[in-house]
Amino acid sequence: TMYKLITGQMGIVEMIQQIYNEVQGDPKVVGFWDGNTPIIMLKDPDVVKNFAVKEFEHFQDRRDFISEEMDPLFGNSLFVLREQKWRDMRSTLSPAFTGSKMRLMCDLIVEIGEQMVEYLQNEAKTKGLQTYEMRQLLSCVTHDVIATCAFGIKVDSLTHKNNEVYLAGKVLSDFSGVGKMIKLMFYRFFPKIMVAMGVKISPEKESVFFRRLVTDSMKVREQQNIIRPDMIHLLMEAQKGKLSHVSNEKVEEKDSAGFATVNESSVGWKKSGRTWTETDIVAQCFLFLLAGFESVSSSLSFTAYEIGINPEIQDKLYEEVKAVNDELKGGRITYEKLQKMKYLDMVISEALRKYPPATIVDRECNKDITLNLYDDMEFEFKKKYAVWIPIYAFHWDPKYFPNPEKFDPERFSEENKHMINPSFYIPFGIGPRNCIGSRFALMELKTIIYYLVLNFKLEPTEKTQIPIKLLRTFGSLQAEKGIHLQLRPRN
């Protein structure tokens, strides 16, 4: 199976589904091998919760396949960090991603939404009705969101697609290419050889450009005492030890930012005394670029696809969007108004179920330990054994989500959402190592979808693949033939 994955004969989704579904009976765990590493796939919600929360200290880290020596940017990011350094970085960054900080950044995202609408309306006026490949279109939008919210740079990548910041971000965030896939596979199986050869995962030219972009911005702000409500400012505050949670943030309810939001654990609330280097700060900006560029643009395009091919859902969503716009008397959408839009949250929650940003949660055992898996069944885990929590398989399991191929936002209505098992709906992960940026991602998704639906009717064309088929990729979900929609101005 792993050979088929590496050679492109099978995608990660197909592999997960095959292992999850083809074992006879209804086991709570399934075992298989990745090379010489045993992997335990979890299939039961109680077992998932036990591993992700109760036994978290023994399964805290992701498998070690990219180090600082292999890639200084990615290797120092929160996604890859291990052991105490991960805990310290998580607690340092946690205050930057609370609801109160997101409110400060909402206006920045709204500006990009308005910029997108202006571009699309001008296109329609000068060229007539236009059909767009939504992943390409929305990657420009999400890039501009990252540029302004993370780095304090204003660009218009829809109008100027060859700007240096966009092109560098596109190269650094692309993990779908054959060359990078081969590098990752060689790093997995021959890490010492790759380090000795000096092979880096991220291209040197773009990495140097990105580092200079961040460090120059930090220096200018320090010298001129510039304060802007964006990620670089928050990271600079964190580096100085000035960033901390405020008392009322801890009681912020999970649903305040959306059903899919994940709450911070006690790990994020512990004060870290560690001093962070410039490289550490740049690495977190790099991670923000990767997540915002790749994951959010993918989620946006899949959400737009489902809205476009389901006119009844689109009409109902437009009614809510139009009502809010009328309340605002045509003014800018606000963070508070976004959080009150129930049907918008239902639509995005369902899109994240069908097309989760991550397909699995991967964890590694950090010591020899014997655990009671279930029903007094004990299992001896050795250090370096791996555990998989198959997010995609959970979200498509008819036992937990009846008729899973149907796009049905009503699953997340007030009347129905209590029936969803929280261990089996995990688009942003589960446990203390969940996605730290879930609130930001949801705010961005809601803002851009709000402006799209308010101003345009999303329509399928002869190029729209229905039903959609997924590419056989090793990484995030991608549509086989792209996502093509016609955007008809509502005015």
Image: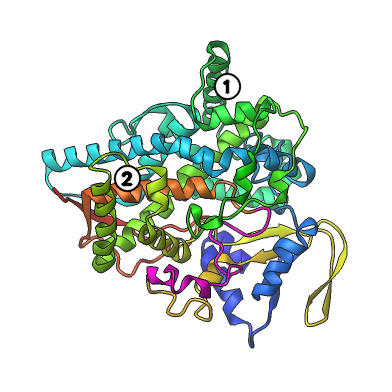
Whether residue 246 sits left or right of residue 109 in the image: it is: right
Q: Magenta stretch: residue 335 in it?
A: no
Q: Is residue 466 above or below residue 239?
A: below
| Three-letter code, disc 1 | Thr
Q: Is residue 178 above or below residue 414?
A: above
| Three-letter code, disc 2 | Leu
The numbered mark, 2 or 1, whose residue comes first in the sequence reads 2
- Quick one: SS at disc 1? helix
**Residue at 27% over, 65% down:** 309
Q: Is residue 165 visible?
A: yes
Q: Is residue 474 visible?
A: no
Circle 1 is placed at which residue position? 215
Provide the residue span drawn in magenta.
408-433
Q: Position of residue 115 (x, y in %)?
A: 29, 35
Q: Nearer the viewer, residue 166 or 454?
A: 454
Q: Position of residue 58 (x, y in %)?
A: 80, 58
Circle 2 is placed at which residue position? 137
Q: Nearer the viewer, residue 335 or 407?
A: 335
Number of numbered discs present?
Answer: 2
